[in-house]
Structure formats: C-alpha cells, structure tokens
Image (cartoon, rainbow, N blue to C red):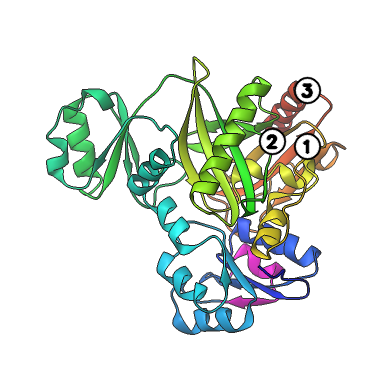
Amino acid sequence: MAAILPPAMLGILGGGQLGRMFATAAKTMGYRVTVLDPDADAPAAAFADVHLCAPYNDQEALHMLASTCAAVTTEFENVNADAMRWLAGHTRVSPSGDAVAVAQNRILEKSWINKAGLPTAPFLALETVEDLHVDLSNYLPGIMKTARLGYDGKGQVRVSTPEETRSAYANLGGQACVLEKMLDLKLEVSAIVARTTNAQEACFPVAENCHENGILDVSIVPARIEPELAHRVQQMALQLANALDYVGVLAVEFFVLEDDSVVVNEIAPRPHNSGHYTIDACVTSQFEQQVRTMCGLLPGKTDLLSPVVMVNLLGDVWREDGGEPNWAVLCEAPNAKLHLYGKKAARPGRKMGHFTVLSAKVDDALEQAEALKDTL
C-alpha cells in the first residue's frame, strides 16, 4: 500500500465533533480535508477546506469525494455502508464498508465477536415476535436493545420478566433487537486500536469509563486495574481488529466482571469518546492515528505521557437562558485542557465538549476533575 502524503486531500463522511477533531489533526499534519455532512453548521465545516453540504448517499457529493480525495474515512458507524463500498471502488476507503456494516447491527456485531473467539454477554437475537416464544430465563434480567441506530443509551430498555420483555419489544416498534443478559460488573473499560496492517498496529492505554444515563461521563487513564488485566484487554481489542482485517481506528468497549473475567460489550469503527484523552496525554492522538492509518502510514506511538481524566461536557451544563458555563475555572487551571465542539445549540444530553485534567497521580486528576465539573 503506497503511502499518501501531504498535501493530499482526505475526505470524511460526517462533520460532527469527531470529524472536527479529525480535520484538526489532518490539517496540522499538512493534509487538506473535505467534509461531507448535510448540516450547514456542522462543527467540522469550520476546519475543512471543502464542505459538501449534502446527504451521505448523495451521488453527486460521493462522486466529488471519489474524484478529489486520495482516501476517505468516516466519523460515525451509521453512515451508509453501501456508499462506503461504492467509494471503495474509486478511492481508498477505511474502515471498509463491510467492517462498518458489522458495527451497525448489534446482532451481526455480537455474532461476529463470538466468531472471532471472544465472549459477549449471553444474548438472544429477536428479529420477529416469534423469537420471543422461547425460554427467556437465560437472558433475564436483561436489556432490550434495538439492533440498529442505538447509541448513548438510546433504543434500550431494561426488562426483568418475559412479560416486560414482550412489552418492550412491542414498544420498540417490533424492529430487530437483541435481548442481552445483565451481568454483575466490576467496571467498564475500553481500548482503542490503530491498525494499518497485521504488522502495523498499536493499542492505546486502557481507559476506565463511568457512564450516566447511558452516556459516557468520565474516562480515567490509566484504568485502575492490574497490568495483566489491562494487557489482556488490549490483546482482545487487537484480536478483533485482526479478525475484521481492519484498517483505521477501532474502539472496543468491555465489561470487567467481579472475577476479573472480561466480555466484549460493543465496537465502534472510528475514534471514540473514551479516547479523547489521547489528544492531550499521549504521544499520538487517536485522530492522528485515523489520518495515519487511512494514509497507509505506520501508527504513531501510543505511550501515555501523564495520567489523565477526561470529563464530557453535555448541554445540561449550560444555563437555561443559553448562557455559557463558568469557563474561567477551567481556563485558569494550568493542568486542565478545555475542548469545545463549536455546536450552536446546547441541549440536555448533547455532547458539547470535554475537558481533561493531567496530574502525576490518576486519583489526584480525578479529584480535581470532579471538583472543576462541580464549579461549572
């Protein structure tokens, strides 16, 4: 695979915050960037050389990407996989449309993870109401999740009985779902892989993640787990990337159970919220890795330069009158870094930005991060 070097044009499907941070990394490295996103106010547009304001399956826009970009990637998994497959016939595309398609459907995703030799929580695929007419005891209490388009806790319902399960399935519109058994968790962690080829891959330090209402709240790095467990998590993430013959940045979320056994929760074929700490605390950020892998370059070093805690900033932090939070407390902290995503409207639950706190000890960083969040 020939390396793509600056000042080549790189394309990305999606112009949200992940696209914005990709564009920042690519432009810093000397590349030019085309963003395809139907939102005229897409956060990435301000950092792009070209903004194609069109639907993701718009043929004219796709032809423009194919003819002007040396390589194309995506910032989210719900992009049209067929559009990515079409682009792959005309320019370099990573990750592949097939890999994205796996991550788009929870039934396919969990089946693929098991096929790759890794465990998931026990799950039952529900594609028709008849699939509920079995003994559900192995999956209850559980979580009913839509097979497609669920993220940040959306499209999920907790169920305890067969009756609740059937009701939840009906309330979700009778669409394809998975019923996943709830496990007794010690904690949740994630590992992010950058892979160009089998011989060119790297894994970032493992993040310990805390969620609120299904949305990531805080990531703690390094995760407060034994080194052997962290290594095992990284090797599992690499195993999945290799099974997919993946090119790009792949995030893998895991459940750590009380006995320190590990199961895979889900994958994301892109940079991930839990990897934002890499911008400030690693030799190479996950977004530079996205650029490097799509360009056929060796992934950069992933060494952690400092313990770090990342805190998500949701629209809930903004005042009811639309006023800004108290940014002074963050801007005046010499070891804190504020990242805002350029979104015009703040809404509850909407990811508006994040901040990181770096310290010599991870527990000190966590204590300071929580205190800063409370003062916003």
Query: Residue sitting at 50 percent across and 75 percent down?
Result: 87
Type of the residue with mark 1:
Leu
Point out which mark residue 364 bears.
Answer: 3
The amino acid beneath tag 2 is Pro
Q: Amino acid at mark 3?
A: Asp
Nearer to us: label 1 or label 3 = 1
193 and 311: which is toward the camera: 193
In three-dimensional space, the C-alpha distance between marks 1 and 2, rounded to whole angstroms, equals 7 Å
Q: Is residue 299 above or below residue 80?
A: above
Q: Earlier in the sequence, mark 1 or mark 3?
A: 1
- Count of all numbered marks drawn on residues in the image: 3
Which residue is label 2 attached to?
205
- Residue of label 1: 304
Residue range corresponding to the magenta coloring:
41-52
The tag earlier along the polypeptide, 1 or 2, is 2
**CB under 8 Å between discs 1 and 3:** no
- Left or right, 156 with reference to 321: left
Q: Position of residue 253 (x, y in %)?
A: 52, 37
In the current view of this chain or complex, which residue is farthest to the top? 259
Question: Is the residue marked by circle 1 packed among few (<14), some (14-19), or many (20+) residues within 10 Å?
Answer: some
